[in-house]
Structure formats: C-alpha cells, structure tokens
Image (cartoon, rainbow, N blue to C red):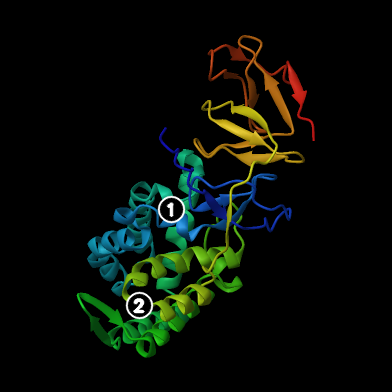
Amino acid sequence: MSKQKSPEAVYYLASRCPSCGAAKSRPSATAYVYCDFCGSLSDYDFRKACEQPKDLPGPVYEKLANALKPECEKAALANDREKYLRTQLKLFDAWVDACPNAVPVRVQDAGFKKQYVAHMAECATACAFDPVSKKISDDMTTATQKIQWKQAGTRMWASKESFIPLLETVVANMERCYSDEMQQQYTPHPDGATSPLLKRIGNALFVQGWLPYVDEDTAKILLERTGLAQEYLTVESNPSAQLMCGHCKNTVPAFPGAKQCVCEKCGHKLSVEQGISCDGCGSHLAIGHDAKDFPCPHCQRKIERVGSQWPSAFIISS
C-alpha cells in the first residue's frame, strides 16, 4: 500500500487591518491584502508579489520605464508637466496589465483601475518636478554608480558597505513621495491606503530588483529597513459562511462579525452582513452596497431591488 504524501502547508501574511483592527484570516489572492471583515486594503504581501519570477513587478517596471525614458526626459527638460503625466499614465497602465499579481485585484473594475493608474502616474509626476525629490533622485543615481561589486562563483554581489547608502536614499525618496506635502498634489489611492502602507508598496519595486544581488546579511537589512520583513502563518480552518459573489460566481467566505470583503476573483467589494437568496436557483449571493438589479451569476434569473430592499434577503449569523 503506497504511503500518501502529506499536503504542503499553506502560508499567509500575518497582518492586522489598520481600519477595523481585525486579523487576516485567509491567504490573499494577490500582493494587495484586503481585510476579511471590513474590506479595507490592510497590507502588502511581498512574498506573493514575487511568486512569478518572470514577471516581477520591479524589473517589469524598469523595462517599461526605459522604453519611455526619452519621452520623459524630453518633457522634463521642457518643463512640460502635462506631457510628462501623459507618459506616466501610459507607463502605469501598461505596468498594471503586465503585473496582475502585484496590483489590487480591484483593478478589474475599469473605474478603479483608472483611479489607481492616475494615483501612480500623478505621484511619479509630482516627484519628478519637485526640487527635493529631484535632489534625492540625483543622490540615488550617484549611490548606484558607486556600488562596488564582488564575484562569488558565477554570481555578482553588491558589497554591503556600498549598497547601504543607496538603500538610505531610496527610503528617503519614499518618505518624500508620501509626505503630507506631496500627497496634496496627486489623486489619493482609490483604496484609501495609509502612508506607511504606500511606502512599503513603493519600496517593494526596489527590493525585488536588488534582492538577487545582495548577500544574506544585506538582504535582511534591506527587508527590515523597507518594512518588508514580514511574518507568515499557516492556514487554519476558520468557521465561515460560504456565499457566492453576485458578480462572478466565486465563493467568498463570510466570517463571524464581518461586514464587507473583497471578491478576490472579480475585485468587487461585497457586503457580507446580509446575503440574498436567488428565488430561481436558491444560491446564496453577496453583493455590494451600491449594486443595482442584476442577473444571478448561476442561473441568470434577474434579481430586482424593490425600493431600497432586496427580496429574499437574509442576515448572516455572527
């Protein structure tokens, strides 16, 4: 009789929502971690962002940015902020499409994606025309040029002594980008992300590009200094009601006490305090607060709101 192989442990990021204080209860589908209880963006999972080595968001961004570099430089020299912004919009729109595992799952909604791309592009543009940010950028270039390389077998390593000054300029750059003064110049993140979280997300692009080129000690400093040294827990069975997303048929869990969650397949924010039973097939559905009449994703029967109420609504026990 052959011995059955034990299932591999599944890990997820140990995090706590800054909005409602709830702990994460299940693995996230993408690097953007949404609260299982209020649906707010609560953390950024660096390990999840690195799961597809061929499509790491940091290197992909650098490739796209290099292709548009002549346009950006021309706009910057002409002090043409509008043209620079158009180039950045083009860059981040392409980057979002190329790196689905590293962006919010909610970008599948066209309106959310437009706001998200605008946030990224306007932030980059504000920094490009900010004297303080430009000085930090020049310091970053100088620090990069001073990197000293060591060879160990077939691998090249950046020496710790020469890498740390570069790391400090990158951290300073993120501090400036997401300072109160700079955030007044661009569209807020559509998920209402906090400054510390935005800094971790911004630092992640730099970290992904450099991790393969630093030794273990330097990598530890790099992760800790950028806020990406994260703790992971093994998945346990947590009691939850199982609902069907009213937009895409994906199964979504409703944990006791939860009010909203994000469907990690289609990106819609769903209310899980109250469900709707389809009177055609009996499916238990979760929909957003602002949802209008819609076809059941399972049997296609049209479900219509009566005034401000949904027929066959039920309260999910807490």
**Disc 1 or 2, which lies upstream in sequence?**
1
Residue 163's disc is none
Callout 1 secondary element? helix
Residue 214: numbered disc: 2
The Cα–Cα distance between marks 1 and 2, rounded to whole angstroms, is 22 Å
Label 2 amino acid? Val
Residue 291 lies, in percent from the top left, at 63, 28
User: Going 57% across and 17% down the picture, which residue do you hit?
Assistant: 296
Res 49 → quadrant: bottom left
Mark 1 Cα within 10 Å, few/some/many (few <14, many 20+)? Answer: many
| Quarter where residue 256 is shown | top right
The N terminus: image quadrant: top left
Eyeballing the image, is 173 above or below 316? below
Which is more toward the observer, 4 or 316?
A: 4
Disc 1 residue type? Ala
Could you tell whether 182 is left or right of 110 in the image? right
Q: Residue under label 1, please give it.
A: 102
